Image (tube, rainbow, N blue to C red):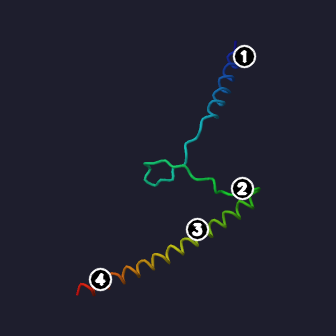
Amino acid sequence: MNRSIRARGTLVAMLLVAVLGCVRTPDINVDASGWRRERVDTTRIPETRNHEEAKAELRKAHREIERLRRENEKLKRKYEDEKRKHEDLKRKHDD
């Protein structure tokens, strides 16, 4: 009897593990507001063969992020400069 109960318990545990292993995990939420759930676009992630290649790709991505941040700051400064010029011209025109 004790063996039978143990065997059934083992079978039930194995079935639970099998069923829970098939459960799909939720998608990553990339929306800061938390209202919408969007999938992360993984189509452009390069394949790597080992950890060193993955680290090299990560360094490359960080360099690109830094380049884009610098470019963004440059464009912000340019925008602010053009906005200031526009406001000055508008003020001169109104006077």
x, y percent for residue 33: 43, 53
Image side of residue 57 versus residue 82, left or right: right
Q: Hey, what amino acid is under mark 2?
A: Glu
Question: Residue at coordinates 63% horizontally, 34% vertically from top-left?
Answer: 22
- Numbered disc 1: secondary structure: helix
Local SS, label 4? helix
Q: Earlier in the sequence, mark 3 or mark 1?
A: 1
Q: Residue at x 76, y 56 (%)?
A: 50
Whether the residues at callouts 2 and 3 have beta carbons within 8 Å, the answer is no
Badge 3 amino acid: Ile
Q: Nearer the viewer, mark 1 or mark 4?
A: 4
**Which residue is identified by label 1?**
3
Other-residue count near label 1 (Cα within 10 Å), few / some / many at <14 / 14–19 / ≥20: few
The first of marks 2 and 3 along the sequence is: 2
Task: Compute the Cα span from label 3 to label 1.
Answer: 61 Å
Q: Is residue 34 above or below residue 78?
A: above
Seen in the picture, residue 94 relative to 41 is either above or below; the reply is below
Residue occupied by mark 2: 47
